[in-house]
Amino acid sequence: MPKWLESAVFYEIYPQTFFDSNGDGIGDIPGIIQKLDYVQSLGCNALWLNPCFDSPFKDAGYDVRDYRKVAPRYGTNEDLYTLFDEAHKRGIRVLLDLVAGHTSEEHEWFKASCGANPPAEFKNRFIWTDNWISWGVEGLRFIAGEAERNGSYITNFFKCQPSLNYGFLRPRAPWQLPIDHPDCLATREALKDIMRFWLKGDKGRGCDGFRVDMADSLVKFDDGERSGAMAVWQDVRAMLDREFPEAAIVSEWSAPEKSLRAGFHMDFLLDHEGSGYKSLVRDYKINPSFTAIEPGSNKSYFKKDGANTIEPFVTFYMEKYHETKGQGYISLITGNHDTARIAAGLEPRELALAYALIFTMPGVPFLYYGDEIGMRYLPLPTKEGGYTRTGSRSPMQWTSGKNAGFSAGPPESLYLPVDPSPDAPSVAAQEASPQSLLNTLRGLLRLRASAPELQAAPNLEALFAGSTEGGGRPFVYRRGPFVLGINPAGAGARVPAPQAPGSPPRVYAIGDAALVNGVCSLGPQSFGVWKA
């Protein structure tokens, strides 16, 4: 397990819209380099970059044309190596986004596989049926009539994303190869070679690991335990442990009891139905046009007048926590490029309290760019396959000036438009306000950095999770010598905390919070931390 993960706090950057250094309207790697001091000022010491490899961008870079080449819109391989260098000088680690399940239809591997007589190396690099009218197998997406080859190919999402062939756990037809078939093992080795390329870098100037897209879906007809996917990733992890023991991998899986056994160091908790996480910040209904939350539907725990207690989340989380303790880390997120911005359903004070929980829980947390200032979800038309996700990918709002400080180019050149609202939040405005969301977030991350017990360590004890007479909805928990209490409701709460006798010193607070003689008093919309 890489030791650096014990204190890691990640910042996710969508390269297209973070900072444009050359005025062409698209964010780039030199722009990220220019903003590394800002990332460091937040208290983040690790980056996750969404895909920056060469691509036709039919799915915003999640359709890779060349895994070993930086997309020209972002710069060059040398620019990326420079980013690694400059980040490392500041103590910042860098993860790249690894699209492991599919490529672009323009990838050389796939083009080679499309021929009437494909070369042996690429004949089974992707999943092809054995004739042009074989399709309709349950659970698989087929594309036919696109190649000289007498067969149909399987995709993961869009037509342009053919599935790489890691095999079938339970083959049902001759063209469905088992996971230990030599050609499926060759696909694994090709994946490892891509990872080696970027981990080694140019003259040792490599990245620090990968976030893996759709990590649980590589093997087709997998079982409920994802035994096939586990076999693939355990093999990859063995390579990393031998060759790159300080490299880290985080999975898009949202089932840490499986993904961590599969070899991942971290797994995200995403806001899937039943995950518990959804009940915290995104328990609402969106109108059919996906432009607004339906009035009265927001039950989220962190909503001041929300209906949820934290019990569904705590029950779900503690089950996963105990199942995975010592195996790796659960990662809570503020949001990501695939979900509605967290500010879509929460006001600034509500956001501050949500961040108080996310960044004081065990595991390795992730902050999505712009969430630190409460950037809003924008109702934007689709861009590069984003569809309803596009509104969470708008340009970073650095200032209140031209293009929100994102780009010096003309507004019509921007990859996506900036928030046009006169009160759109910006870094510059919030820098000047000690009580801003931005500076509250910085305070929380300073608190986390101040004590190993408040970092990734698996030392959580839930003391109280529920509601109190009068409408309070507190959560009181302990991490090592620290007692923490949070109450997002508009009404105050008092709950027993006998594990903290006397009046321990308070080390951090939002609002009115006290811990005296074993009683935790939490005012409306408050958070407190005491060192008992």
Image (cartoon, helix red, strand yellow):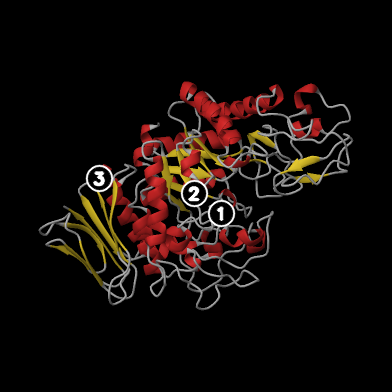
Residue 514 percent location from the top left of the image: 18, 65
User: In the image, is 139 to the left or to the right of 497?
Assistant: right
Please give the residue where the numbered disc 3 appears in the rendered image.
451
> Is 68 placed above or below 272 here?
above
Secondary structure beneath dot 3 equals loop
Q: Residue at x 35, y 65 (%)?
A: 436
Q: Amino acid at mark 1?
A: His
Mark-to-mark CA distance, 1 and 3: 30 Å
Residue 297 percent location from the top left of the image: 51, 74
Please say whether residue 204 is visible from this viewpoint.
Answer: no
- Packing grade of label 3 (10 A; few <14, some 14-19, many >=20) is few
Q: Residue at x 37, y 40 (%)?
A: 325
* Quarter assignment of residue 216: top right
Q: Which mark is residue 337?
A: 1
Please say whether residue 64 is visible from this viewpoint.
Answer: yes
Residue 285 percent location from the top left of the image: 55, 70
- CB contact under 8 Å: marks 2 and 1: yes
Mark positioned earlier in the residue sequence (2 or 1): 2
Mark positioned earlier in the residue sequence (1 or 3): 1
- In the picture, which quadrant includes the N terminus? top left
Please give the residue where the numbered disc 2 appears in the rendered image.
12
> Is 502 placed above or below 63 here?
below
Q: Amino acid at mark 3?
A: Ala
Mark positioned earlier in the residue sequence (2 or 3): 2
Please tell me how many numbered marks the rendered image carries: 3
Mark-to-mark CA distance, 2 and 3: 24 Å
